[in-house]
Image (tube, rainbow, N blue to C red):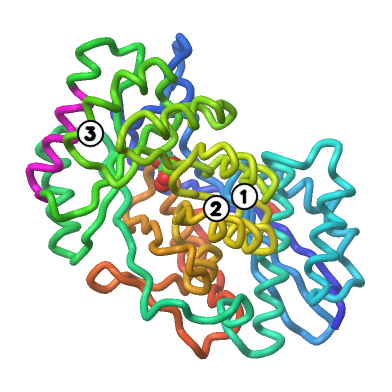
Amino acid sequence: MKITKVRTRVFEWKGHTVPPTAHFCSNAMDELWDKGDSMGTFRFHGWTVVEIETDNGLVGLGNVALAPRIAKAIIDQYLAPLIIGQDPFDYEYLWQRMYRSTHAWGRKGIGMAAISGVDIAIWDIMGKAVGKPVFKLLGGRTKDKIPCYASKLYRTDLKGMQEEAQSYLDQGFTAMKMRFGYGPRDGVTGVRANLDSVAAVREVIGEDIDLMLECYMGWNLDYAKRMLPKLERFQPRWLEEPVIADDIDGYAELNQLTSIPISGGEHEFTHYGFRQLLEKRAVSVIQYDTNRVGGITAARKINALAEAFSVPVIPHAGQMHNYHLTMSSLASPMSEYFPVHDVEIGNELFYYIFKGDPEPVNGFIDLDEETPGLGLELNSDYFDQFNIIE
Ligand SMILES: O=C(O)[C@H](O)[C@H](O)[C@@H](O)CO
Ligand SMILES: [Mg+2]
């Protein structure tokens, strides 16, 4: 079997979006004095869709969620020529070919995200070629079903957050993640506002539900050191990305500071990046996203490393490209799940572009044993709401 064609399309949402309110989610721009839209940095309203065709008529589907127009250009100009004419089952060779030939500029960030999109499509082809779901190629089922945590709870008014938390309990979730809205520049009142939001959610969910806390890199080391002891009484399952992704020593310091596990890796790349995080004991939970980290070929290596370090892997976002790895790895106890809603920050856009992602039932998702490949197809129902760039 040979790869004959690589097609990339950018899907840019032009439909209705829910505007974020102030202090919706702390983020890496918060430290800067900025007159602009401080929420702009973490809205993702576009996606790159990768379709790889083979000479026996198979089409593999991959995706990239970061800087979609750039990802498309990288795939079209640099990666497609490296894989056309090649056998998709040579996935490790192809990964190394893409990785090494773009090494001067592509090791981390959007270069690796583009490689990820291609690699995901290659795994989809392999599954379709042998008539098996991708998790079967990765070792098979290690769990009956995958427990999921509901991930939204952006910082709005406390009553609204409480109602939202209650709705996840009603749907059967036993774990959920909330976002902080305030950081170092918001002073003592911001500290109080952050603590109040966790107290409000805990009040509704009680002590027997896992609660994850997300900073999205909106704090700094000093602020995080002051916040962590104050958060201990809420017994969070983890505190996520307290500082920017490059401050690995900061993560390591925070991870030893209190009983609260520090999570990260959503903005880290390849097994080399994760070796550093693991060796420094910088994170207690790993959160790569397969569509950034280097695809399934890199993610499975990270799973092996994490297993040896006894650090759980709970990938960013859930979604099919991650679920297959979670299903097949003992290192992965759980998945993130974005409850479907109107287009807000863009995480939910995945469901408007693809269909096939499983719906959680009582807080668990399952993968079908019979559907070959990743189990995704394009969802043409919403095509007219996108600007589609070929
Ligand atoms: O962990 C996450 O789910 C991500 O950090 C968020 O989706 C991010 O996009 C900020 O909301
Ligand atoms: Mg996160």
Residue 374: x and y, percent? 57, 74
Query: Which residue matches tag 3?
Result: 232
Along the viewing direction, whichever of 302 and 346 lies nearer the viewer: 302
Residue 78 locus on image (x, y percent):
86, 50
Label 3 crowd (10 A; few <14 / some 14-19 / many >=20): few
Q: State the residue in front, 113 or 212.
A: 212
227 or 293: nearer the viewer: 227
Please give the name of the residue rendered at 54% of the width and 60% of the height, measured from the top-left corner: 307
Decide: few, some or many residues near mark 1? Use Cα within 10 Å; few <14, some 14-19, many ≥20: many
Task: Give the residues in magenta.
Answer: 193-206
Q: Is residue 388 visible?
A: no
Gap between marks 1 and 3 measured at Cα? 31 Å
Find residue 2 and report its image quarter: bottom right
Q: CA distance from mark 3 to mark 2?
A: 28 Å
**Rendered location of residue 304, percent (x, y):** 60, 62
Which of pointers 1 and 3 indicates the residue nearer the eye? 3
Residue 292 is marked as 1
> Which of the pair 100/341 is nearer the observer?
100
Instruction: Report the residue marked by disc 2.
Output: 289
Q: Name the image quarter holding the N terminus.
A: bottom right
Q: Tell me if 354 is positioned left or right of 294 in this view.
A: left
Q: Is residue 49 magenta?
A: no
